[in-house]
Every structure is written in C-alpha cells, then in structure tokens.
Amino acid sequence: MRTGKPLLDLRLYRRPTFSAASFAMFCLGAALFGSMILLPYYWQSIRHESVLDTGLLTAPQGLGMALVMPLAGKLSDRFGGGPLALLGVIVTTVMTIPFGLIGAHTSIVGLSFAMLVRGAGIGFAFMPAMTAAFASLEHSELSDATPQLNVLQRVGGSIGTAVLAVVLQRSLAGTHGINAMAGAYGTAFWWGAGLTAAAIIPCIILVRAERAARATTAEPPGGDDVRAEALVEAAAV
C-alpha cells in the first residue's frame, strides 16, 4: 500500500465492481476445478469406466463452455457483464444439483446433459465477470487487474479442490457397497453446489456496482479495444 507501483495493487479492491467480480471468480474457480476432481473419480471408481472413457465423459462441460464463450462476450457488450455473470452462476448452481442426487446407476446421458448445461453456465459467468471488473478500471490499471483475477481463480480452484477432496474422503470413510459410495460423491457435490451458490451474492453486488460505474464513468476512446485485449490475455492464461 505504500509503494507507488506494487507487484499486487491492492488498491483495486476498494472498488465495489472489482472486489465483487474478484470474489465471484474465486467461487467459480472453486466450483469448476473442484468438480473436475470429483467427476473422474466417480466415473472410474463407481462406474468402472476406463481412463479414455472417463476423459470423454468429462468433455461435455468443456464443450458447453466453448459453445457459449463467444456469445457471452457479445452479450456482455450489450447488457453488461454483471447480469450475465449472475445468470451464469445461477445456472451453474442449479445444474450442480443433479450431481448431488447422483447414484451408482444414474443415467450417463442425463449426467452428460447436466454437465453440458453446467459448462454453459460457467462460460456465461467467467468472461462477463471479468468484463464487469474491467468496466470501472482505468487503462493503466488493466495490467494489474488481469493477473490478479487469474490468480484468484486459481487459488479458488486449489481451495475448492482441497475442500471437496476432504469432504469426499470423510464421506467415503466407513462406507460399504457401491450405493453408499455413490452417496458419498453426492455429498461432495452438494458442497460444490454450495461453493457455487456463494458467488450469487457478489454477482448481485456486481450488477449494482457495474450499473453505477457505467453511469458515472465515461468510456474513453479506444476503451473497448484495450479491454478486449485484456480479456483475450486473461482467457489465454
């Protein structure tokens, strides 16, 4: 705080838009990467799928993200990032519920569809949240904001993975039978749904803060181009 150009500019978090978007990115990272460790274990230990089949069965979530990311960028320019991020978080939370009800013989088609829609929800949440975060920043602050959002996303992923792994391990302790083991995975997924739902509140704050920022801050010339470059850089990282 006493350095003119610090490695991590914590002054950015004084802005409601940026701080709310940062917390949303943290929760989304926890939900995304946490589920990525649960699903492969489920497919291999409960459904006894091969490594190759497990990889293919986890693909729908990434496919859903890939399909909506270009659309999310266009809609963010039109409606703002906050509303889309809120929509994405709600969709992601709702589509995590089927995994909380998972069993040893749950339909693979149904789970794949839920993963596809869940991935779409994540896609609608990630990029618009970053767009909203950049909306209230000056051009000179974008280089500080982009890496911090990426760091928060990855720290959230690390913490989410650790939490869900511990929940799964404790739920599996003392279980006998395939149905009981599947129920343990359901418990871990309920925690994942809770981590995702935690992002709803900061997204609501984000919507209000973004509206206030857009109402009081005039966009300087070339602002869209600079923010687009920052978003491309963030997505690549």
Image (spheres, rainbow, N blue to C red):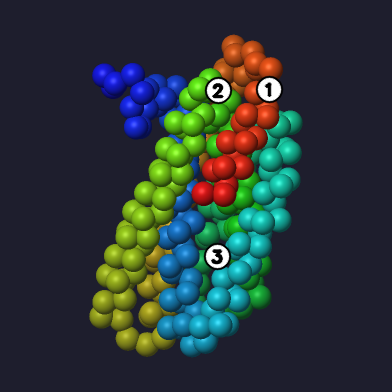
* Residue type, label 2: His
- Give the residue at mark 1: 222
The image quadrant that residue 132 belongs to is top right
Whether residue 108 is visible, yes or no, is yes
Q: Is residue 32 left or right of residue 73?
A: left
Q: Is residue 141 left or right of residue 68?
A: left
User: What residue lies at 55% left-to-right and 76% top-to-bottom?
Assistant: 55
Where disc 1 sits, the SS reads: loop
* Residue type, label 3: Pro
- Give the residue at mark 2: 139
User: What residue lies at 61% left-to-right and 62% top-to-bottom?
Assistant: 62
* Residue type, label 1: Gly
Q: In x, y percent, where is residue 74?
A: 73, 38
User: What residue lies at 42% left-to-right and 38% top-to-bottom?
Assistant: 148
- Give the residue at mark 3: 98
Q: CA distance from mark 1 to mark 3?
A: 44 Å
Q: Earlier in the sequence, mark 1 or mark 3?
A: 3
Q: Is residue 62 left or right of residue 27?
A: right
